[in-house]
Each structure stands twice: as structure tokens, then as C-alpha cells.
Image (cartoon, rainbow, N blue to C red):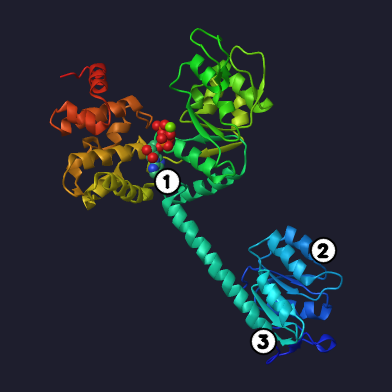
Amino acid sequence: MSSASAGTALGNGAQIHIQSRLHQTQATNFLNLLILDEDRAMRDASRDVAHSMGFSAHVADSAEQAYRMMESQAIDAVLLDLRLAGTSGLEVLRAIKRQRPETVAVVITGFGTVESAVQAMKAGAYDFVTKPFGTEELRRLLGGVAEHLRVKMEGRVRREQNRSRQGYGNIIGQSVEMEKLYRIIAKAGQSTHPVLILGESGTGKEMVAKAIHQAGPLRNKPFIPVDCGSLVPTLIESELFGHVRGAFTGATGPKDGLLAIAEGGTVFLDEIGELPIDLQAKLLRAIQEKEIRPVGSVKQIPINVRILGATNRDLEQAVNEGTFRRDLFFRLNVLTLRIPPLRERRMDIPLLVAHMLERIGRDSGMEKRVSDEALKLLLAYDWPGNVRELENSLERACALSSNPEIQIRDLPTHLSGRPSAIVEHSGNGIVPIAELEKRMILDAIAQVNGDKMTAARMLGIGKTTLYRKLKEYGAEN
Ligand SMILES: Nc1ncnc2c1ncn2[C@@H]1O[C@H](COP(=O)(O)OP(=O)(O)OP(=O)(O)O)[C@@H](O)[C@H]1O
Ligand SMILES: [Mg+2]
């Protein structure tokens, strides 16, 4: 890679003379190149060549100035003359690679100093050129750098695309809405502030919470979900904050609270809208003061935990109605993330179906696919129970049919009814979960000609549960 051949000679000290600007029109490549050279004429000449190739070229005449620029600019590549007064160019190269390892560095070495070129390559330089060299040589070098960065960038974009196809963690979806969500998840992962996750039932709130935890530096620490909706208030309190021995009847021994156990990790408060108001105050204090007091104790225990909350309720309305504390709402609402319902991102349906069938197929050892008509139906339906409902419908269909191809008749009957018929039920577009559940259960029994044992198995619930539910519906027979 040595010596000049064509073009203006560079690196010969005073005789450099580049004819004004090089007027080659070349599209900007958006790459930031930093030129570190103590020789002003060299700097300017290199900058002109880089400009003409579409680089944003920045120049520095000392290592210190270069380090400062590296801090303030997103530098992609560095052109570095190893011969610097007072410092070792090699050390500067190492410092640059330490500061930003992905920087592509090209070094300029003096004539007859092959050894320093070898050392530079060992220190992570991408390429080198020996003085004196010509503009053509420099163009070729920088062209190589741009191409290398382009390929690297493409690889990254491809990985990102694959990731969004597979989603974050196990989250599936590549609609614009989901892409937006992935970006927010990535950002939320980097912070330790509370996050409020909003979304209808079955949209994947817990999945997203897990993904936020996984995307951040706390990923190796515990992730502890707590369902604030299903526990009785006294139990939630002792679950979250812990208790001392004898704090209440039945507290035969001390117990650590989950907020303490999660040390350094994440506590996911599911259905946070259901948290009783006195516990809301206690939680707010825990978040603000970063300490908790176990039930029955007088001592405060320091905690170090990130809070993620989720709800399908309209918390703002709850605040206005006085059932949710405004101050806690503001605390949690630092970062809010809304997961769009499935009917607002129908393009994700085929992808979800493919993934779910693949999983079901793996579990059951039987390959499954959907017929075109069945897929059309899945695309047209409104999915009030969102992804969870889709998952259940497919599992049901697979359980019902021994045929490898799922047909319309294998899908729950209410899917093929007028979609709006379901919505009309409550008039506001929302179907109560209990109503959905009832339909699913009755549907399942109907599908297997009244065989309740099989229906219970298909639904993944116990026989007793099924009978209890039927009694609730007044549909025992
Ligand atoms: N984008 C998605 N990709 C793949 N699976 C999903 C997605 N969203 C949800 N699911 C699946 O749907 C089901 C429901 O997800 P999850 O429990 O996270 O939802 P949720 O919003 O917490 O629901 P609920 O309000 O009922 O608690 C899970 O089985 C989950 O695996
Ligand atoms: Mg949930």
C-alpha cells in the first residue's frame, strides 16, 4: 500500500498543492471522518479529498483535540498520522480504539517504517498508507473505508430487521406500530425510571415488561411479576414489603418483601390500577425514598429496584375519580408505553399465526398451517382479547382438527359471525373478559359435541373449574 503513483503527491511536506476544491460531485455518505495530522497542508489536502467523496470531514491538529471531537461527534473513521510531536501515534490509536472500538482507523506512517505499520495493524488499525502517497491512493483508501462501513451498517440493519421480525425477546410483530414499540422498549431498557405499560387485555403487557428488563443493564438481575389484581390487599402488602414474625395472625416467621428480594432487578406490578389506595401511598414512598418498612416492623430497609407497572384501565380516569393517587400516577408516568390492540395492526396477524403454529407444531409433533379462507377470517376479526385470544383460537383449532390444514370450521364460531355483533354487546367496543371466556368455553363444548372432559382438556383448565363456570353461566346441561 505504499508510495504515490497517480494524482497529486501528498505527504511530501511543502510541495503539496491541491488545486482548490475537488469538484467531483458525489452523494454524501453520512460518514464522519476525523483527520488527525499535525501538518496543516496534509490536513487540508486530506479533508478536500474526503469532502469530495461525500464524507463529513473533521480535522484535529493534536491528540487532545481529537479526543474531544470523538466525545462530541459520532466519528465513524479516523485518518491518523502516526508521527505526532510529543506523543506516540500508536498510543493515540490505542486510546481511540479504547474510547470507541468500532472506529475504523487508517494510519499514515513515515517512509521506511514498516514496523510501526505492523504494530498499528495489531493495535486495531483497519489499513495503513506510507508517505508519500497520492490523492488517488487516498481516495482508494477512503473508498475502502466507506465500503467497509457500508457493509457493516447493512449487517446491522439486517440484524435489526431480523430482530424486529422475531420481535424483542419473543414479541412478534413488524408493523409500524410494533417497530415503534421496539424502539421505546430499547430506550426504556437503558433507563431505570418507572415505566407504565398500557394496553388492552392480551396485548402482551407482561411480555413487554420482560423485554424492557431484558433490554437493559439489569438483565441478569431478578424480574419479579406481582399481580396486584388477584391478591387480597393484606397479602399484596406483605408480598411487596415483607413482614416480621407475628405481624398478623398466621405470620409465623419473618418474610422478605419482593421489593427487597428483587435487589438490583425489576418488580413488575401487573394490574397496578387495582392496587388499594393505602398501598398506593406506601408504594409511592418506597419509590421516592428507596426504602420500605415491612408490615409490623419499625425499621426501614433500603431497596434498589426498578418498578414497571401495567394496566388495562384508564388510569387518568381513575385519578379523576379518586381511586388512583395522582402523585403515584405522575411518578409512574415518567415513561408510558401503549401497546396497540391487535385490530390496529392486522398486518402482524399472519406473522403471529405462523409463529404460533410453528410452536404448536413443535409441541405436538404435527405440522400445521391455515387455509386461505381461515386466514382471511382471522384477518377480518376484531380480536377483543388480542394476541391471547388469537393464540387460544389457534390452539383450539389445532386440538380440534387432525387435519394439517386449519379450516374455517375449526375456528371458534363467533369469529365468523359479524364482528360487530360482539362489539354491540356492550356498545363501547369492549367485551368483558368474562363474556369472552364464557363464549370460548361454550364454543369449545359445542365443538366437541358436548364432551366436557375433552373441552376442559382443550381449554387447559380442570374439569371442576369447567363445571363451576358452567354453573355460573347457568348452563350445566
Ligand atoms: N406480540 C406478541 N408476540 C407473541 N406473543 C404475544 C404477543 N403479545 C402477546 N402474546 C402472547 O399472548 C399472551 C398474552 O400476553 P401477556 O400475558 O403478556 O398479555 P397481557 O397484556 O399481560 O394480558 P392480560 O391483560 O390479560 O394480563 C401470552 O401468551 C403471550 O405469549
Ligand atoms: Mg398480564
Q: Which residue is mark 1?
A: 170
Query: Which one is earlier in the sequence, the residue at label 3 or at label 2?
Result: 2
Residue underneath mark 3: 136
Image coords of residue 140 (percent x, y): 63, 82
Report, in whole angstroms, how far the alpha carbon at label 3 lies from the one at label 1: 50 Å
x and y percentages locating residue 418 in the rendered image = 25, 38
Relative to the observer, which residue lies in front, 254 or 164?
Answer: 254
Q: Which residue shows up at 71% across the image and 75% down it?
A: 107
80 shown above or below 208: below
Q: Amino acid at mark 3?
A: Glu
Q: Dividing the picture into quarters, in which one does residue 294 lie? A: top right
Work out whether 312 lies above or below 30: above
Residue at mark 1: C-beta within 8 A of ligand 1: yes
Q: Earlier in the sequence, mark 1 or mark 2?
A: 2
Instruction: Provide the residue designation for mark 2.
Output: 64
Task: Give the quarter the ligand 2 occupies.
Answer: top left
Q: Amino acid at mark 2?
A: Glu
Q: Mark number for residue 155?
A: none
Q: Image quadrant for the N terminus?
A: bottom right
- Which tag, 3 or 1, sits closer to the chain's start? 3
Gap in Å between the C-alphas at discs 1 and 2? 45 Å
Pick the residue in front: 361 or 199.
361
- Mark 3 vs ligand 1: CB under 8 Å? no
Residue 210 in percent (x, y) is at: 49, 39
- Please state which amino acid type lies under the numbered disc 1: Asn
Tell me which residue sits at (46%, 53%) in the image.
Answer: 164
Quick check: 222 left or right of 350?
right
